[in-house]
Image (cartoon, coloured by chain):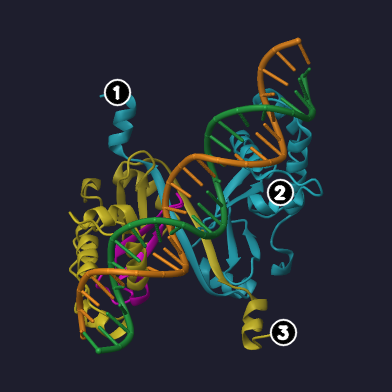
Chain colours: A cyan, B yellow, C orange, D green
Amino acid sequence: MKSYRDHGCHHRSPPSQWQELIRRQAGRVTRTRQLLLEALLRLRCPSTPKQIAEAVGRRTCDLATVYRCMTLFEQMGLVHRVDFGDGLARFEIADDDPSGHHHHHLLCRQCDRIVKLDDCILGEVESSLASHYGFVEIQHRLEFFGICPDCQQARRRPSP
Amino acid sequence: MKSYRDHGCHHRSPPSQWQELIRRQAGRVTRTRQLLLEALLRLRCPSTPKQIAEAVGRRTCDLATVYRCMTLFEQMGLVHRVDFGDGLARFEIADDDPSGHHHHHLLCRQCDRIVKLDDCILGEVESSLASHYGFVEIQHRLEFFGICPDCQQARRRPSP
DNA sequence: CTATGTGCAAACCGTTTGCACACAT
DNA sequence: ATGTGTGCAAACGGTTTGCACATAG
């Protein structure tokens, strides 16, 4: 069993040929974009724009640029946006895994520790999380999003 | 099977003796607080502060007051805060159900339709939601929150 | 050289707070 | 009469946008 100490965040190899991806899909391969991707790889866990900017290093990157690049990377599938419901945007580098490997996280409400959960069961999850990671008072937040029948229909005949 | 048209939100009877509750737990029974609770009962579904203020009626209630009262009601267990991850706070009246009846929602990404889900399975949930409610492209958002071992320990010996 | 990307500063938007007046007890 | 609650306006914090300069191609 893996300790929670490692933050549950595996090492991820850089997405292959992202330079080529950017060049083809999104424009120019910039020093800033390289630095941002490297920062994300170093951070490994879902991180706020502020954390990402600081991780870039000395001549730290502007927040506006972080947001613009994260939006870009997200559209390219290089990065996933994660929502912990605290009003802060977070981004994490996507796994090489083609489909983006959907996963969840276990957070400590007190410190900022994050455990990445690789499988998505849920029935027995909460109690087993407690025994596996030693967390207590576990809660979860869950919502479903989809397209309802009316909107499916509205899509077919675009305007009223 | 119930159509999604009813928004999946059941009629809820007003929490019994909430005036008494307020008086005992939280202070004064105000006209504004009565109007806010009535608005929440009328709305039935998770609603934003702005929606709630408008639902109060003519001499609409100040947003600051909505926030202050929602916080109060939440602490009293009269109201639940719901997070759909769109950066807006939402509040719904709590069921009479003593423990607050934990539940989830199914939202349409296109319109604002909300279906309340009474049971929390999840394994087969997404596909069965599709067939039950006619929604498509269903996704869900899920995070776990708890207290990690270190913080449990830090709690026991308060200051370093 | 030209068009895209970045930094800076201002705008935005939801939420919170300070303060004087209103009102429940 | 007293102290809590409310409206108003300003403050706040994260995110977005406009614009002039920097830079990749």
Q: Which mark is residue B160?
A: 3
Identity, as a three-letter code, of the amino acid under mark 2 = Ala
| Residue placed under numbered mark 1 in the picture | A159
Question: Identity of the amino acid at label 3?
Answer: Pro
The numbered mark 2 sits on a residue in which chain? A
Q: Give how far across and how far down residue B104 sits, in percent.
A: 37, 59
Residue for point 65% across, 38% down: A69
Q: Secondary structure at mark 1?
A: loop
Asked whether B94 falls inside the magenta stretch, the response is yes
User: Magenta residues?
Assistant: B74-102
Q: Is residue A96 left or right of residue A110?
A: right
Q: Image check: B15 left or right of A100?
A: left
Question: Dividing the picture into quarters, in which one does residue A32 lie?
Answer: top right
Q: Residue at x 24, y 73 (%)?
A: B96
Q: What residue is shown with label 2?
A: A53
Is residue A86 depicted above or below A128 in this figure?
above
The answer to which of A121 and A38 lies nearer the viewer is: A38
Measure how far apart labels 2 and 1 are at the Cα level: 43 Å
Name the subunit of mark 3.
Answer: B
Residue A130's x, y, as percent?
A: 57, 74
**Residue nearest the viewer, comparing A5 with A51:** A51
Kindly identify the amino acid type of the residue bearing the numbered disc 1.
Ser
Q: Residues within 10 Å of mark 1 (few under 14, many from 20)?
A: few
